[in-house]
Amino acid sequence: MRKIAVALTKGGVGKTTTAVNLAAGLALAGQNVLLIDVDTQGQAGRSLGVTASGGLAELVAGEGAPEQLATPARDNLAVLAGGKSLAGLKRVIARKDFGGERTLAEALVALDGRYDYVIVDTAPGWDVLTVNVLFYVDEVLAPVSLEVMTLQGLMEFSQSMTDIQRYRDGLALRYVVPTFMDRRVRKSEEILAQLHTYFPGQTCEPIRYNVRLSEAPGYRQHIFEYAPRSAGAEDYGRLVERIMQDDAQGNA
Ligand SMILES: Nc1ncnc2c1ncn2[C@@H]1O[C@H](COP(=O)(O)OP(=O)(O)O)[C@@H](O)[C@H]1O
Ligand SMILES: [Mg+2]
């Protein structure tokens, strides 16, 4: 079972879009996938039309069995919803005298081995929930918007990850996914070149700017349903292939 967090401190870089479409693409490729929403906005579940009465917060609170709280969203794809109740979860974690950073990992142990992939969508910023996610996953995928200067943000994020890696041997920044690629914008190409310089092994093929990607959630669909022939579907399809390839080669 591979556990991948989609994370970067900066907001609006395509984290939720990437988490949802990566999870959906893997499910379409026949993998059994759980998408966990660790954002109080609850956007990941909502964009797939999932209306869940409980989710991650309830799981941690022991208010339901994992298999009941993980809501079926599509074939091979279940969602463990986030949303407002996560604010309460943050307080529960903050009140703990010790071991708070492992709260999520301990609660999610019950799901070990049930899925081929667990994809975690995270909130912007760096808080107790972010730290908890990094104590749970083994791999991090960081989307980096090529529209604005987010390279600095990626450097800082990667530095913050180093602090956690001292306690988590297996944790790695595996993928850097350039988003909002626009070939007409020269800065896009420049930032992309910088990413390849600083993160040569991790940098994936870019996700182009594609308005279909921003429309799909409004229809409660992922990109492979909403616009299967769009550039967005093509780009996320390629990302799915890359990630599964690593799997097959045993590199994960
Ligand atoms: N490649 C893209 N092309 C066009 N719009 C995009 C693309 N990726 C994301 N968006 C849109 O940009 C906004 C921010 O993306 P989102 O995934 O919510 O970012 P984050 O989760 O990092 O805050 C959303 O409205 C989303 O639909
Ligand atoms: Mg988001």
Image: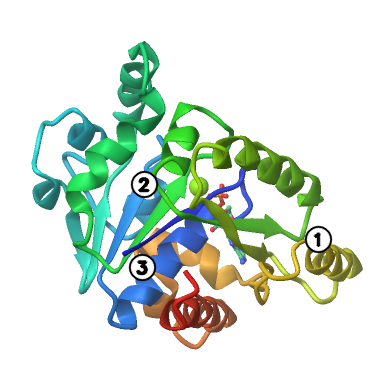
Label 1 sits on residue: 198
Which element carries disc 1, helix, strand or loop?
helix
Which element carries disc 3, helix, strand or loop?
loop
Residue 9 visible? The answer is: no
Q: Which of marks 3 and 1 is nearer the N terminus?
A: 1
Label 2 sits on residue: 37
At label 1, which amino acid type do we have? Tyr
Q: Quadrant of residue 59?
A: top left
**How many tags in the picture?**
3
Looking at the image, the residue that sits furthest to the bottom is 229
Image quarter of the N terminus: bottom left
Can you tell which of label 2 and label 3 is closer to the viewer? Answer: 2
Q: In which quarter of the image is residue 199?
A: bottom right
Q: Which residue is drawn at 75% across and 69% down?
A: 200
Q: Mark 2, residues whose alpha carbon is within 10 Å: few (<14), some, or many (≥20)? A: many
**Cβ atoms at labels 2 and 1 below 8 Å apart:** no
Is the residue 77 above or below the residue 5 in the image?
A: below
At label 2, which amino acid type do we have? Asp
Q: Mark 1, residues whose alpha carbon is within 10 Å: few (<14), some, or many (≥20)? A: few
- Residue 195 location in percent, x, y? 79, 63
Separation (CA) of disc 2 from disc 1: 29 Å
- Residue 225 location in percent, x, y? 36, 78
At label 3, which amino acid type do we have? Gln
Label 3 sits on residue: 221
Q: Which of marks 2 and 3 is nearer the N terminus?
A: 2
